[in-house]
Amino acid sequence: MGRVADEVTRQWLDLSLLTSTATIGSLNFFLNAGAICCLLARSQFERKGQLAVEGRVGVPEHLSRGPVLRVEWLKRQSDMITVENLVKEFGTKRAVNGVSFEVKPGEVLGFLGPNGAGKSTTMRIITGFMPATSGRVTVGGHDIVDSPLAAKRLMGYLPESAPSYSDMTVHGFLNWAAEMRGLSGSARQDAIRRVTGLCFLENVLHQSVDTLSKGYRHRTCLAQALIHDPEILILDEPTDGLDPNQKFEVRQLIRRMGEKKIIIFSTHILEEVEACCTRAIIIDRGVVVANGTPAQLKAKSELAGSVTVRVHGVGVEAVRTKLAQLGVAGKVSAQAEGNTVSARVQPRERGQGADLASAVADVVAKEGWRFDELHTEEGRLDDVFRAITKPDTAKAAA
Amino acid sequence: MGASLVRTEQLTAMNEGFRNVWTISKRELGGYFNSPVAYVFIVIFLLLTGFFTFSLGFYHERGQASLAEPFFSWHPWLYLFLVPSVGMRLWAEERRSGTLELLLTMPIAPWQAIVGKFLASWLFLAIALALTFPVVLTTAYLGDPDNGAIISGYVGSLLLAGAYLGVTELMSAITRNQIIAFIISVVVCFLLLLCGWEPVTQFLVNHVPEGLVSLVKGMSTWHHFGTFQKGLIDLRDVVYFGSVIGFSLFTTSVVLRGVRGA
């Protein structure tokens, strides 16, 4: 809501804002302006895409003065990205086979999957680069096929190979991108300054793109995606080809921006998902095989909830029998390394992790075992990933 | 009031369309002049037109202050190679480097990109053509040429370049390899030229019905460019070149849609 109010005052201050009344879900602005100004205002707001604008030229009853514009902002489903039953065929090959999901503002969606799983294809369809064979995508309430321009205005897109025009300078390229996004004058210069800061491009701003290293080129393309401060960011492998420091910075950036925006990014680096996603989707051979928060996904791991304990000076068999006698314990495995024994106890039923840990601790205390480790496994994302996606080699055999 | 509302909105949309076309054009033009290619091209073009006009065109021997024969009649042949070399990169390069994905996910309609690119290259060719002005000055100095014929010659030449350029843009969209785009464009432009070239039409007259001959001849750039050389700006010829350009650009949009679908 505040964002819209800011927008109105920023752009139309000179039109003397008469009253602004905020009601739940909508915002009414009465601008004291000429008819032409009202129309301009209306087209400006409609260009923002996410604002449902009621532009009325008329004199409201309680005002005696000129034409008035009423801007209504409705917070609705239209803020989201919805993907329904997306199918994409290349010849006889189905790259995407019935993918459906939704993303809301404030969500950072990690898109995981082996190479060739259909991540990039899905993103290309969402951004309107490719038409889908069947299925529907709406971005901020706009169907990507029926009203592509309105949908594209809301999005910033970093394609997989981070392409940019190699014959331009970084500044020239960003200037072009800003112009394509309809920014002009000081707004354009401000936008360029903002993204060069965000993406650490100050040092190379006037260098030609083809003289840049891969990391800089990548960030140049990322800057292009951010130039119009979009509501929605689609990033295809945003940290690919960056050094560890740059990766860290980009993750920070994604997390920071993800608080207000919708971000979808693809990656095959699992730690990245844990570092910045609020939700992750695993896609394999064109099908969504998992969809949940990183914690939920990790909980699907075989190991999730099991308790590991390491004790000294006790026989392997003694440890195994004692632990197996616990009511909440499932499978118990134990092995000796010299004088120490490591045992892993799996819960009998999933979700009993906490009970299990205290039960194990009780046993350890009662028996008077010396121990230097006792912890509950959270589960590991790469286990889940391996378990539910099949490697490329299997695909060739199938 | 209602009608004017709609009109204003349409105008805003149109303005935005033109602005997008111009943004694309500016970038393309910048692309030409940022690299040495543009200057090399212009120098080669001017050297060749000079050479053809003053040596092969028997400019001096003719003893006439006319540009039709010695100057303009070479243009269809010169453009055959020079225009495809200007236009071959238009889409092929975008496809090769992946920037096509960037361009087509910007909030612009594909036709705006297609027209923008076309206009940039056309403007570039127009600049090259305008730099042949010393030929005109020389003729004006040596004699008393028919200025109307010179103007119509230039108009025709520019339209001819536009038609070749349209074909080249289409071929450039078909492949991601500039060289292939160049070769196919040369071949197609050559066919367009050839089907109205006198030796070919003479040959056709003896073998196929007359109606077909005039149809084939009517498809030729040679035939339509000839009118301009004579000093006539005939609406039919303008329409011809316009439709070649229009058809090529429209087909480019169809091809690009196919490229994205596959």
Image: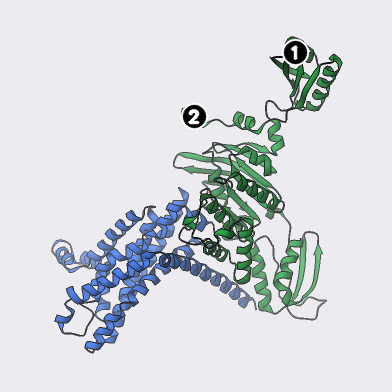
Chain colours: A green, B blue
Q: Please, which chain is the residue tagged with disc 1 on?
A: A
Q: Residue at x 80, y 81 (%)?
A: A64
Which amino acid does the dot numbered 2 rest on?
Answer: Thr
Q: Does label 1 or label 2 sit earlier along the sequence?
A: 1
Numbered label tally: 2
Q: Are marks 1 and 2 in contact (CB under 8 Å)?
A: no
Task: Kindly state the secondary structure of the residue where label 2 is placed.
Answer: helix
Residues B38 and B229: in front is B38
Instruction: Answer few, some or many: residues within 10 Å of disc 2's Cα (few below 14, many 20 plus, some between 14 and 19).
Output: few
Which amino acid does the dot numbered 1 rest on?
Answer: Arg
Residues A322 and A171: in front is A171
B209 lies left or right of B179: left
Q: Residue at x 64, y 56 (%)?
A: A198
Disc 1 target residue: A320
Q: Nearer the viewer, mark 1 or mark 2?
A: 1
- Which image quarter is the N terminus of chain A in? bottom right
- Image location of residue A352, percent across then percent down: 79, 26
- Residue A88: give its label: none
Q: In this rendering, does residue A281 appear at all?
A: yes
What distance separates the C-alpha of mark 1 from that of mark 2? 38 Å
Indicate whether B251 appears above or below B124: above
Can you tell which quarter of the image residue A110 is in? Answer: top right
Instruction: Answer few, some or many: residues within 10 Å of disc 1's Cα (few below 14, many 20 plus, some between 14 and 19).
Output: many
Disc 2 target residue: A393
Q: Please, which chain is the residue tagged with disc 2 on?
A: A
